[in-house]
Image: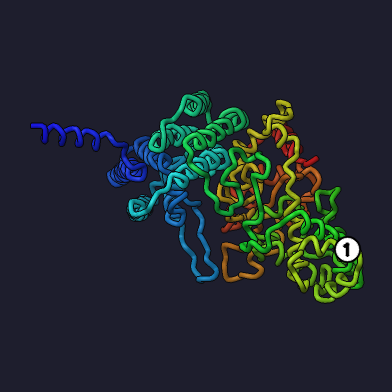
């Protein structure tokens, strides 16, 4: 009898041991993936049987809600597969492999379902749903992965940043406009996963609850994104990071653009452009930046000491020149407008045509371009090494280098450019809780993230085309920019298509630049054709070239007219001016 009693108590002790978090995580994920597959099957059935429009749209929305509950997992652990589940409805071009991958997934399906069912494309809609079901099967491999607590909580933290930047702007719900319900669903489901790694405490539970309650008070057409982000999502993210520390779960330690320890986009040193160097030796430091600054303003890099980088990139103009198109060494216009270098370190591609992948490569191309500086880095190096004013700066910047090479000059200049991300505008100060914005400026931000649709391309908080929250890809767009406002003649510059004319999707495609400091960087667009912010907003308000009746088949900008009122345009400009660094 004693033997059986002992075995019984051993069984009780064994059964009371907490389940391994990785196993519990997989179990919950399996349940949620099952629900997602079920909801997509229901969507398929409503379409196949030609149910009423409301039924099909509701089935689509329910499938999206099911997806949002596991988005933090799929985006983090299987980003490539997720492109065909919830990627943008645009071709993905892999230049190295000479491949064009057609889009698929929820955003493609949405275009057949909203704002009304495209009955003429019934079979294509069924095909796209079948295609989505096939892609969802790839998520079965998620069960084969190993899950560390640090990774899972990192994924949850990044989901909060994703909601702030993409979810609340309606980035992936442009037609259904279901961003509030989807953001709420994602927030409401996260604690179920967090509980696996430790009991969600009162502070974190309250932060989730308050964020969800706020969303429940909102409507899509006049959504208060400013209040949502500043007063709810930011405090929630900080609560999550603090809770993670209490659980004694260390943050991830890999090099990335947005720090793995950041609890807010506006934390000191939240961003680092060193990730894009892909080489620890090229990482920036103050000494390199100081040397780079000297080189940046020294005409020694150009032919005949004619101009410096600073000739066209003037600090008082946010490192632009105020000209329609820049003037090179000969005084003649070059092809494009001078872009700001502010925050240029926080993008994965450089130049308007995204033709280079590093600031180092950009520096070399500009110096050697016969139409720009017509210089030679080898010749400049020989002069710099003999210049007394440089000796100490070089020693500080590269103390372990016995022989200076041109790559070191490029790296120093790039390090200086990477330092030009101060995040000290009035907007930044307000988001840090250290300043104020007036009501018009707040309305302008809400328009930016809402009705005006600016935030779906110029992503908060960098306000450029580098996609949050991993910031690994900088996007381009085809807008149909005219040679002058309202001329209805598309500027002849092919942009990305200049070097890749065989890719029709890239004709007239240009990088989405930051609009931080936009108050100082007129004139606008790649060709400098738009003299002021009013003319730029007018262009977008009319839906670009297509919206103004000019045929441009590969335009990526929606041709839908925004119908912004005069007061809304005024508010939008007021907000844009808060992005000027002090």
Return the x and y of residue 422 as percentages of the image width and height: 74, 45
Hey, which residue is sitting farthest front in the picture? 2
Query: Is residue 476 visible to the viewer in this orientation of the structure?
Result: yes
Residue 198 lies in quadrant: top left
Hey, which residue is sitting farthest left in the picture? 1
- Of residues 44 and 15, the one drawn nearer to the viewer in this rendering: 15
Query: Is residue 131 visible to the viewer in this orientation of the structure?
Result: no
Return the x and y of residue 370 as percentages of the image width and height: 81, 73
Return the x and y of residue 542 as percentages of the image width and height: 65, 44
- Callout 1 environment at 10 Å: few (<14), some (14 to 19), or many (20+)? some
Tag count: 1
Question: Where, quadrant-wise, is the N terminus in this rendering?
Answer: top left
- Of residues 467 and 403, the one drawn nearer to the viewer in this rendering: 403
The residue shown at (56%, 46%) is: 260
Question: Where, quadrant-wise, is the C terminus in this rendering?
Answer: top right
Residue 412 lies in quadrant: bottom right
The residue shown at (83%, 72%) is: 381
Return the x and y of residue 464 as percentages of the image width and height: 66, 49
- Of residues 466 and 543, the one drawn nearer to the viewer in this rendering: 466
> In what element is the residue under mark 1?
loop
> Considering only vertical position in the picture, is 53 above or below 120?
above
Q: Is residue 322 left or right of residue 155?
A: right
Residue 161 lies in quadrant: top right
Colouring used for the render:
rainbow
- Residue at image mark 1: 298
Q: Is residue 517 left or right of residue 346?
A: right
């Amino acid at each position: 009898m004693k033997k059986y009693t002992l075995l019984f108590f051993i069984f009780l002790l064994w059964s009371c041991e907490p389940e391994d978090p990785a196993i519990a995580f997989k179990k919950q994920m399996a349940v949620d993936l099952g629900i997602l597959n079920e909801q997509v099957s229901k969507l398929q059935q409503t379409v196949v049987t030609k149910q009423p429009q409301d039924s099909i749209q509701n089935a689509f929305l329910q499938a999206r809600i099911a997806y949002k509950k596991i988005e933090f997992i799929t985006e983090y652990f299987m980003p490539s597969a997720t492109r065909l589940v919830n990627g943008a409805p645009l071709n993905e071009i892999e230049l190295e492999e000479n491949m064009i991958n057609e889009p698929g997934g929820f955003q493609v399906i949405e275009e057949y379902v909203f704002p009304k069912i495209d009955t003429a494309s019934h079979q294509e809609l069924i095909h796209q749903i079948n295609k989505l079901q096939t892609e969802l099967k790839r998520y079965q491999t998620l069960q084969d992965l190993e899950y560390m607590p640090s990774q899972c909580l990192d994924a949850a933290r990044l989901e909060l940043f994703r909601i702030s930047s993409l979810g609340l702007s309606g980035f992936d719900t442009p037609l259904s406009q279901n961003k509030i319900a989807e953001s709420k669903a994602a927030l409401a489901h996260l604690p179920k996963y967090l509980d696996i790694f430790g009991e969600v405490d009162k502070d974190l539970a309250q932060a989730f609850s308050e964020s969800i309650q706020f969303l429940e008070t909102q409507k899509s057409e006049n959504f208060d994104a400013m209040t949502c982000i500043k007063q709810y999502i930011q405090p929630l993210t900080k609560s999550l990071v603090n809770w993670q520390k209490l659980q004694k779960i260390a943050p991830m330690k890999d090099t990335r653009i947005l720090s793995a320890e950041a609890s807010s986009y506006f934390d000191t040193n939240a961003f680092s452009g060193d990730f894009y160097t892909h080489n620890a030796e090229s990482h920036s430091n103050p000494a390199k930046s100081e040397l780079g600054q000297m080189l940046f303003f020294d005409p020694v890099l150009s032919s005949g000491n004619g101009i410096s980088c600073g000739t066209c990139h003037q600090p008082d103009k946010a490192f632009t020149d105020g000209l329609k198109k820049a003037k090179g060494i000969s005084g003649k216009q070059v092809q494009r407008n001078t872009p700001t270098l502010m925050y240029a370190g926080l993008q994965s591609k450089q130049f308007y045509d995204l033709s280079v992948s590093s600031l180092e490569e950009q520096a070399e191309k500009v110096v050697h371009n016969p139409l720009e500086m017509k210089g030679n880095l080898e010749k400049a190096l020989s002069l710099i090494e003999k210049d007394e004013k440089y000796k100490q700066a070089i020693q500080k910047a590269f103390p372990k280098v016995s022989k200076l090479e041109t790559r070191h000059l490029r790296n120093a200049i790039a390090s200086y450019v990477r330092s030009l991300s101060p995040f000290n505008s009035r907007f930044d100060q307000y988001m840090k809780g250290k300043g104020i914005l007036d009501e018009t400026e707040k309305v302008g931000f809400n328009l930016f993230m809402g009705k005006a649709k600016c935030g779906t391309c110029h992503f908060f908080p960098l306000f450029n085309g580098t996609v949050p929250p991993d910031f690994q890809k900088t996007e381009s767009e085809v807008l149909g920019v005219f040679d002058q406002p309202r001329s209805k003649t598309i500027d002849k510059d092919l942009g990305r298509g200049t070097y890749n004319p065989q890719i029709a999707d890239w004709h007239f495609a240009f990088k989405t630049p930051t609009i931080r400091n936009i108050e100082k960087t007129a004139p606008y667009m790649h060709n400098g054709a738009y003299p002021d912010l009013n003319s730029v907003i007018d262009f977008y308000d009319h839906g670009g070239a297509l919206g103004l009746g000019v045929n441009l088949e590969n335009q990526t900008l929606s041709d839908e007219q925004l119908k912004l009122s005069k007061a809304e345009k005024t508010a939008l400009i007021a907000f844009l001016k808060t992005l000027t660094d002090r």
